[in-house]
Every structure is written in C-alpha cells, then in structure tokens.
Image: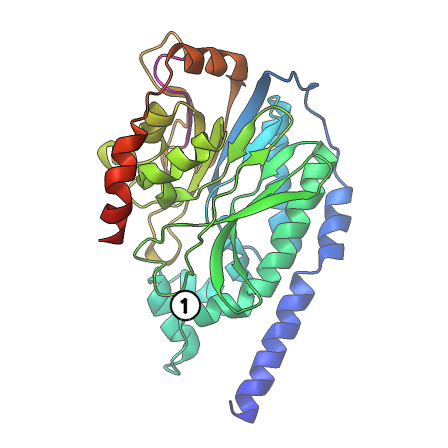
Amino acid sequence: MSIRDQLLASAINALLTFKSRPSAIRRALARHPYPHTPTLIPTHVTIAVVQMQADLVDDGVAFGEKYYGLVRQAVEQGAQLVVFPEYAWLPILGLLPPVREIALKGISLKDAVDELGGGGGLTIEGVFRTIAPAVKRIFESTASELAARFGIWLMPGTAITIDQAGHIFNTAYLYAPDGSLIGTQHKLHPTALEKDWMTTGCELGVFDLAFAQVAIPVCMDFTYWETTRIATLRGAEILIDMSADEKADEPFLAMRGDESRIQETYAYSTRAYCVTTLFGLNFCGPSHIAAPLGVYDSDTTYLAQAKSHDAEEVIVAELDLARLHSFRAAHPRDFNLALYEKYLPSAYAA
C-alpha cells in the first residue's frame, strides 16, 4: 500500500469512527419518550414485522433515529417482539463519502464499488471490510439501547460481521428487553450475490425466550427444508425469518420460503423484507406473519401481511402458543428414522 493509500485509509477510518460513535447514538435516543408494551402473557406474544425502506443515512444518529421511529410504531400497536429485515444495515453505507453521489446514478453495487476504487481493484468484500467496524458500533448500540428503553425483544435484522480469523458473515442479532444480546445467527446458505464475500455459517441456534423457543435463520436458509426441520426438532416454536429478495413480489418464488416450511414443521413464522432500489437492487415485499394451515379456522396461512411490496410498513399479529401446542399434539409427526438413517448420510456424502 502506498503512502497516499495509507493516508486515505486512515482518513476514512477516522471519519467512520467519528460518525459511528455509540455515545452520540445513545444521547440522541435518550431524548425520546418510550411507551411500553402490555405485560406479557406467557402463552401469547404480540409480534411486529418491519418492512423497512433502506435509504442511506449520514451517520449513526440518523440510523438510530430511523429505528426509533419504526420500533415506536410497533410498540404503540402492542408489539413485544419486533423483527427487522435482512440487510437492515445497508443505510450505513451512506457514511462512506462518495456513496450517496454514486447511488444517485442508479448503478449496480459492483459498478459502484468499481467507481469507488477508481479502477484500483476495490471489491465488494473490501468495502464491507472497511465499513464493518462502523456497522458493528451503530447496529449494536442502536439495537441494545432501543430494546432496553422500550422493554422489548428485538431482532434488528442482519449486519455484516467479521470474526477473529477475518471471515465475513451475514449475521442476525437477537436482543432481550434489558438490552442484553441473547445471541446471533450467521446465514447458512448464501445467495449468488453473497458467494464472493460471505462465509457460510455452520451452526443453527434455538433461543429460549420468556414466551417461546425461537430460531432466526436468514432468508435463503428457509429455501431448504433441513434448516427448519432441525430448528423445530430442537424445540423452535417461532421461526423468525428476515429477507432481502428481488423476487418477493412473485408469489410462486416467494413461496419457497417460510410459508412452505411451516406447513412441514408446525411453527409460527415471520418474514420481514427490506425494500430498496439502491444500487439497481429491487428488494421488495410484501412482508408477513404466518401460521401453519389448520392452527386457526382460516384458509390462509397469513395472520398479517403488508399492503404493499415496495413501501415501508409495520404489521402486527398476536401469536397464541397454546393453540400451536394443541395443534401439534393433535397432529404428531411420524418420522421414519430407519429410512432416513439408511439413505440420508450417503445422499449428502454424494
């Protein structure tokens, strides 16, 4: 790296550090009022899904303010668990000085990165590595502060994270009502857009909340039945899905996700979509909250669904865990373990 490049990198890092100060985010959020949700009934939880418009922000305070407004909408409708979409961190790219101007051109993310690099070989992975520390500070400070102040469980979507070995992940977070981090989940199945930079996760967590066991697989993870089968066999009752999908407004493609999986695994589910046209993307909805067919006296799997596929919305539904338990007891799954043991290991090995 030349001296010029070293100085430029140092200047960018200093700017990103300044714009992502956790103390500034906390001070800004402390100025707001914080209504609280009703007292939790152990067998019931009101869940909100945020279909979030991903617009670029100038700094961490602006990101925190956007999240505050959306979480408050959810809490005022009684939400005790609030779910944000995959790639909820995208607005933080606005902290990089030239990104806003490049985004206005409507060019792709790859072309934008090429322009940022000035032909110097800059990659999407390189951009993500540069901004990852700022994303971590902003994302974690905002989520922890809002969860504690509102007294809610908060799944703030996914952010890019880097482990000690330097691997980059697309990672979902889950926070408790006291602001503590309950756990994280790396995405397990990359899309074509992610294969060049994302490291694939290899563990699937199930988290014990006060009202239910939940799992938080990410977007493409729901395309494969193995993910949700493993999660529910390990006790998951709610599958929290968050997504960023350019085909979500095409029902026959969207049905590859949680809507199909919960008919097989008997769990409630959400899908929170990120909506944006940044960098030529067409991330869209509609977002939803769903139950297996037969749990309610209804011919639809949706308990709530966004009215639009390309606008910001907050949708809310109450999940009755006792009703789900009764349905599971009345419809036990009869697994043929001998069959699976005979064929699956060799099938996967092949």
Q: Which residue is mark 1?
A: 124
Which residues fall within the magenta stretch?
287-295
- Name which quarter of the figure residue 263 lies in: top left
Q: Is residue 257 above or below residue 307?
A: below
Q: Is residue 96 visible?
A: no
Q: Position of residue 111 (x, y in %)?
A: 33, 68
Q: Is residue 158 above or below residue 262?
A: below
Residue type at mark 1: give it. Ile
Q: Bin the neighbour count of mark 1 within 10 Å (Cα to Cα): few under 14, some 14-19, many 20 and up.
A: some
* Residue 174 lies in the magenta-colored region: no
**Which color scheme does this rendered protein use?**
rainbow
Q: Foreground residue, 186 or 298?
A: 186
Q: Position of residue 27 (x, y in %)?
A: 77, 50
Q: Is residue 159 visible?
A: yes
Secondary structure mostly seen in the magenta stretch? loop
Count of picture labels: 1
Q: Residue furthest top?
A: 297
* Residue 292 lies in the magenta-colored region: yes
Asked which secondary structure carries label 1, the reply is helix
Q: Is residue 178 above or below residue 330?
A: below
Q: Residue at x 60, y 86 (%)?
A: 7
Q: Foreground residue, 338 or 127?
A: 338
Could you tell whether 326 is left or right of 194 in the image? right
Q: Residue at x 44, y 54 (%)?
A: 201
Could you tell whether 289 is left or right of 223 in the image? right
Q: Foreground residue, 295 or 279?
A: 295
Q: Position of residue 281 (x, y in %)?
A: 34, 53
Q: Position of residue 167 (x, y in %)?
A: 49, 65
